[in-house]
Image (cartoon, coloured by chain):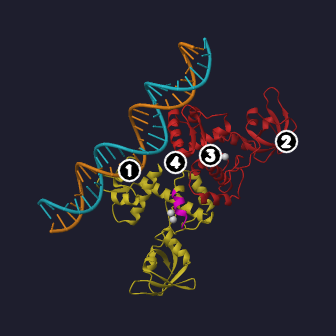
Chain colours: A red, B yellow, C cyan, D orange
Amino acid sequence: MTHSEENYIKAIFHLGLEGVGVISTNALAERMETKPSSVTDMMRRLSEKGLVNYKKYQGVSLTDLGTKMALSIIRKHRLWEVFLVEKLDFNWDEVHEIAEQLEHIESEKLIDKLDELLNYPKFDPHGDPIPGKNGEFLERDNLLLSQLSIGSTGICVGVKDSSAVFLRFLDKNKIALGNEIKILDKEEFDNSLHILVDQRELHLSQQIANNLYVKKI
Amino acid sequence: MTHSEENYIKAIFHLGLEGVGVISTNALAERMETKPSSVTDMMRRLSEKGLVNYKKYQGVSLTDLGTKMALSIIRKHRLWEVFLVEKLDFNWDEVHEIAEQLEHIESEKLIDKLDELLNYPKFDPHGDPIPGKNGEFLERDNLLLSQLSIGSTGICVGVKDSSAVFLRFLDKNKIALGNEIKILDKEEFDNSLHILVDQRELHLSQQIANNLYVKKI
DNA sequence: ACAAATATTTAGATTTGTCTAAATTTATTA
DNA sequence: TAATAAATTTAGACAAATCTAAATATTTGT
Ligand SMILES: [Mn+2]
Ligand SMILES: [Mn+2]
Ligand SMILES: [Mn+2]
Ligand SMILES: [Mn+2]
């Protein structure tokens, strides 16, 4: 597998998780920041290799083999992200781009040793689950902060948007994974929230609350 | 820089250290395990980018910029090798191939953090010097075990051949970097050595002794 | 100094991954 | 349902990195 092929497989996997139904050439082209015609070419090549199911004009999906490949790449990506944060003191907003490179390093033993060094983490720095050697992984709670009712409390367990700008916003407001967040009040007009986190009262827009995953307690 | 370009630059640098005089197209082709015609193509491209001095039929050498690039890649390669051995418990015969991949990861910050994690090592697991951020590095003693006279003692500081088969031979005979080796006797017929290492008496062929660097004490 | 051997470059192809522009298929909607 | 719009594929091109075979330059040996 080339880096490019691996990136396509990963993109198809992620679109499959998010999207509804079949993955179109255009959707994939947009995600890969390339042209639909390039996608068509690549789909033929991946289909040839048995990694995707593709019939022209019908969209694309991963085969079992393709899914296994995708999980392996995502496992590597997320383990490297944990390494960068835990062992090299990177901030969680700096690790994604480097992990995009490291995820293509080929060595089963390397990734197993890394897993061991990190003590078999189950989630990456953004709260995303890390697939195990055999592709199995824990589901993270998919409840959004915006879905909590007034008076209830949740533990912050992940971010939906993991862009650097959002992550730095959270840093600035001292909101981190593991924090308890209590909903004090909700504005009817714009659905913004008054919350209590770490003894501090904060005001969050709905957009923010739509991008924080919580586990209700 | 593509991976391929980086590999060529590295090969030119290493040939420059070993070889005498100009680096020929054929020598480079052999080192890169490719065809001379491919080398000619690549030399034109690298010359275009200002990384090598190349005039046809005249051989090739690195420019200052090319040398800087080479040292940066070698720094990354060797730091990753230290990481693999020190932090992930790899044996010294297993790290080269993985480092060949890791050396191409692009992130200045990553390599600086790695350097820090490893406590700024000056030599890699094979005793090869690790260039610093600015390209400077300590010279390893270039005295071979075969050059020591009878009765003298040296500390093993490096291997000239770092192939897995040679490294495993050393492991099997419990010869490691840092060991003191005393020359007990030398056979006139085949220049093989009787040595004392770690209270053990061993018999080494000249070929072995030609591939161990020592520091005389 | 010239022929033979060797080294190097050139010419032309191939593969991967990309692009633009044109053709075709599918979906929408009047 | 026929025209129009949107999505997708095809055709043809290009750059990077490689190859083989042929041409050319350099070196060597007599
Ligand atoms: Mn990431
Ligand atoms: Mn992540
Ligand atoms: Mn190495
Ligand atoms: Mn080494």
For mark 2, does the 10 Å Cα neighbourhood hold few (<14), some (14 to 19), or many (20 or more) residues? many
The residues tagged by marks 3 and 2 sit, at their Cα atoms, a distance apart of: 39 Å
Q: Amino acid at mark 2?
A: Thr
Residue of label 1: B42
- Front: mark 3 or 2: 3
For mark 1, does the 10 Å Cα neighbourhood hold few (<14), some (14 to 19), or many (20 or more) residues? some
- Front: mark 4 or 2: 4
In the rendered view, does B87 fall on the left or right side of B40? right
Q: Are marks 4 and 1 in contact (CB under 8 Å)?
A: no
Q: Which of the 4 image quarters holds residue A107?
A: bottom right
Q: Which residues are magenta?
A: B93-100
Q: Amino acid at mark 3?
A: Asp
Q: Where is residue B150 drawn, in percent x and y?
A: 45, 87
Residue of label 4: A2
Residue of label 2: A153
In which chain is the residue bearing label 4? A
The residues tagged by marks 4 and 1 sit, at their Cα atoms, a distance apart of: 21 Å
Q: Are marks 3 and 4 in contact (CB under 8 Å)?
A: no
Q: Amino acid at mark 1?
A: Met
The residues tagged by marks 1 and 2 sit, at their Cα atoms, a distance apart of: 62 Å
Residue of label 3: A64
Q: Is residue B175 visible?
A: no
Judge if badges 3 and 4 mark residues of a common chain. yes
Q: Earlier in the sequence, mark 3 or mark 2?
A: 3
Q: Where is residue B180 drawn, in percent x and y?
A: 54, 80
In which chain is the residue bearing label 3? A
Q: Is residue B92 visible?
A: yes
Residue A63 sits inside the magenta stretch: no
